Image (cartoon, helix red, strand yellow):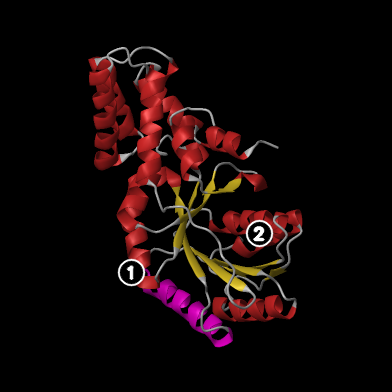
């Protein structure tokens, strides 16, 4: 099994490769010059770091370059990583248990963001940490979503409460809470149907799920996380704003980062929304969902070691 930092490096390999390609391998050890700084600026925009972060990184590198014209690419990479880590201060979400069991985590977002696989992988990760888990298959809208989560549950040996396609999602949530409570489970993970924030019927369904959980525990769901497809880059910010306004998010999970060169968007998402980032999806295997770590992220996207 790969170490956590190696998973980060592997997960952001496309972003690193894109930056290296645009800068002609700047971070491989060659000296910085004016043209390489221009190339780096282009690479940072292409990787979706955004205007604010890109300018901060370039300003710090230029300041160091003015002091020492023999500055090398690896030095610039270290400076960039330190700027990112500073920009991401306070961004690491920590899953804390509720005052009473089960802690309820609702996963929401648009179709295709990876909610169902995230629910399963998160269950697997928490189980590995010694927690008892229950899955709630509340995506009863999308054909085969329930079967998909059931298949993951079987593969990972996780208990699940499910119904059929078209069933009342709130009723499934209600039953799942009762089952989790009766088994004294630590955490209930609620997979919900993918929806656009403009679809009022599905947004109403989310509100109904919340009301039903409230009947069991006025504080539930204790966590409401938007699952964001990392390949959308900064385009996901408006989507997250809309969900936050309508549902009240408490955090984010960013998925599919291994398949995109736009890994810089995480910084912009944090700076814009100030919603903590709990987990990153860095691959397709169960162990590829990892807790977000700002230092690991910052060093990985600049191709640095631990």
**Please, is residue 302 above or below residue 174 in the view?**
above
**Please, is residue 236 above or below residue 109 in the view?**
above
The foreground one among 37 and 46 is 37
**Would you say residue 263 sits in the magenta stretch?**
no
| Residue 58 relative to residue 270: left or right | left
**Residue 27: x percent and y percent?**
41, 20
Marking on residue 245:
1
Q: Please say whether residue 221 is visible from this viewpoint.
A: yes
Q: Residue furthest front?
A: 67
Secondary structure of the residue carrying tag 2 is helix
Quadrant position of the C terminus in the picture: top right
**Please, is residue 129 above or below residue 2 in the view?**
below
Please name the residue that numbered disc 2 is placed on.
123
| Residue 263 relative to residue 63: left or right | right
**Residue 129: x percent and y percent?**
69, 56
Quadrant position of the N terminus in the picture: top right
| Residue 121 relative to residue 257: left or right | right
**Label 1 Cα neighbours within 10 Å, binned few <14 / some 14-19 / many ≥20:** few
User: What residue lies at 62% left-to-right and 78% top-to-bottom?
Assistant: 100
Magenta stretch, residue numbers: 199-216
**Residue 298: x percent and y percent?**
44, 37
The foreground one among 34 and 260 is 34
Q: CA distance from mark 1 to mark 2?
A: 27 Å
**Would you say residue 208 sits in the magenta stretch?**
yes
Q: Please say whether residue 197 is visible from this viewpoint.
A: no
Q: Indicate the quadrant where residue 5 lies.
A: top right
Marking on residue 223:
none
Q: Main secondary structure of the magenta part?
A: helix
């Amino acid at each position: 099994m790969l170490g956590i930092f190696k998973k980060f490096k592997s997960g952001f390999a496309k972003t690193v490769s894109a930056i290296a390609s645009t800068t002609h391998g700047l971070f491989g050890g060659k000296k910085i010059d004016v043209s390489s700084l221009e190339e780096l600026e282009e690479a940072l925009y292409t990787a979706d770091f955004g205007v604010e972060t890109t300018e901060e990184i370039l300003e710090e590198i230029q300041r160091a370059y003015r002091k020492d014209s023999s500055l090398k690419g690896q030095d610039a990479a270290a400076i960039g990583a330190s700027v990112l880590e500073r920009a991401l201060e306070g961004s690491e979400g920590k899953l804390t248990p509720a005052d009473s069991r089960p802690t309820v985590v609702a996963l929401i977002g648009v179709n295709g963001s990876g909610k169902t696989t995230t629910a399963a992988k998160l269950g697997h990760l928490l189980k590995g940490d010694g927690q008892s888990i229950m899955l709630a298959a509340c995506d009863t809208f999308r054909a085969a979503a329930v079967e998909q989560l059931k298949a993951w549950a079987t593969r990972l040996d996780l208990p699940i409460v499910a119904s059929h396609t078209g069933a009342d999602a709130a009723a499934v949530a209600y039953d799942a809470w009762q089952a989790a409570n009766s088994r004294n489970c630590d955490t209930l993970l609620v997979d919900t149907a993918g929806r656009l924030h403009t679809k009022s019927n599905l947004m109403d369904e989310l509100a109904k799920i919340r009301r039903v959980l409230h009947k069991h525990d006025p504080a539930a769901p204790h966590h409401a996380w938007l699952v964001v497809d990392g390949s959308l880059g900064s385009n996901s910010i408006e989507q997250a704003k809309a969900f936050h306004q309508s549902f009240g998010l408490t955090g984010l999970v960013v998925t599919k980062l291994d398949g995109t060169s736009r890994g810089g968007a995480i910084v912009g998402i944090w700076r814009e929304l100030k919603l903590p980032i709990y987990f990153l999806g860095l691959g397709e295997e169960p162990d590829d969902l990892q807790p977000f770590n700002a230092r690991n992220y910052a060093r990985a996207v600049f191709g640095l070691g631990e």
